[in-house]
């Protein structure tokens, strides 16, 4: 089964003799940020040693879910993981369930309150959410997360918590469009 990206005329985009490809999947669960690392000192025979431990213990189960679903999606797609040096674009929508305080009460409990926000503006931080999932997809969607040359991310409310992913190889056409856009900005 091919996941080739099609141009406007319906033909596959090609790059160096192979098709630009994409990997799409959904992960059900509460998105968790990577968090920071906290240093601890441990005593060894050679003396005290510093060791770094993850700050958020709940980030690993979420990363494992992302890893599993990415692996499942990539099983039948020979284009993934992309070889080192191939640029990759990643789009992610992190979806959160609305808190109960966003809804009215009583017989109107299924209706949103007029002052309920349309888009999540609280935690977790978007950059830490991204860091966790990019690391989780390493070795499956791409050889190294250094290959990610474009990221589009959003936080949204939905019926269930989770995240949708679209990872695609960047074609020469993408690069040409970016160069042209930057040149036009410089001229303006």
Image: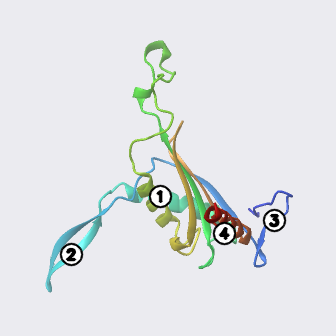
Residues under numbered marks 4 and 2 in contact, where contact means CB atoms less than 8 Å apart? no
State the residue position of label 3: 12
Seen in the picture, residue 47 relative to 3 is either above or below; the reply is: below
Residue 159: quadrant of the picture? top right
Which numbered disc, 4 or 2, marks the residue closer to the eye?
4
Horizontal and vertical percent for residue 140?
Answer: 57, 69
Q: Residue at x 47, y 19 (%)?
A: 109
What is the CA distance from the residue labelled 4 to the residue labelled 3? 22 Å
Q: Which mark is residue 130?
A: 1
In this rendering, does residue 27 appear at all? no
Q: Residue at x 71, y 69 (%)?
A: 176
State the residue position of label 2: 50
Of pointers 4 and 1, the one earlier in the residue sequence: 1
Horizontal and vertical percent for residue 165?
Answer: 59, 55
Residue 75: quadrant of the picture? bottom right
Q: Nearer the viewer, residue 97 or 11?
A: 11
Q: Which mark is residue 83?
A: none
Q: Nearer the viewer, residue 1 or 18?
A: 18
Of pointers 4 and 2, the one earlier in the residue sequence: 2
Of pointers 2 and 3, the one earlier in the residue sequence: 3
Callout 4 crowding tier (Cα within 10 Å): few <14, some 14–19, many ≥20: few
Total count of labels: 4
Callout 3 crowding tier (Cα within 10 Å): few <14, some 14–19, many ≥20: some
State the residue position of label 4: 179
Which numbered disc, 2 or 3, marks the residue closer to the eye?
3
Question: Seen in the image, is 42 located left or right of residue 110?
Answer: left
Q: Residue at x 45, y 47 (%)?
A: 30
Seen in the picture, residue 102 relative to 169 is either above or below; the reply is: above
What is the CA distance from the residue labelled 2 to the residue labelled 3? 52 Å
What is the CA distance from the residue labelled 2 to the residue labelled 1? 27 Å
- Color style of the picture: rainbow
Of pointers 2 and 1, the one earlier in the residue sequence: 2
């Amino acid at each position: 089964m091919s996941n080739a990206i099609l141009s406007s005329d319906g033909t596959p985009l090609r790059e160096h003799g192979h098709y630009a490809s994409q990997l799409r999947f959904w992960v059900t669960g509460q998105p968790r940020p990577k968090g920071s690392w906290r240093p601890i000192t441990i005593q060894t025979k050679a003396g005290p040693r510093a060791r770094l431990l993850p700050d958020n213990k709940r980030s690993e189960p979420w990363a494992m879910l992302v890893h599993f679903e990415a692996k499942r999606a990539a099983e039948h797609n020979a284009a993934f993981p992309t070889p080192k040096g191939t640029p990759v674009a990643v789009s992610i929508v992190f979806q959160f369930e609305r808190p109960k305080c966003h809804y009215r009460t009583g017989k109107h409990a299924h209706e949103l309150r007029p002052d309920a926000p349309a888009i999540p503006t609280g935690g977790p931080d978007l950059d830490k959410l991204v860091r966790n999932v990019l690391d989780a997809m390493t070795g499956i969607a791409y050889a190294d997360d250094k290959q990610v040359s474009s990221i589009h991310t959003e936080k949204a409310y939905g019926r269930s918590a989770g995240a949708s992913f679209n990872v695609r190889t960047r074609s020469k056409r993408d690069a040409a469009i970016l160069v042209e856009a930057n040149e036009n900005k410089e001229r303006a």
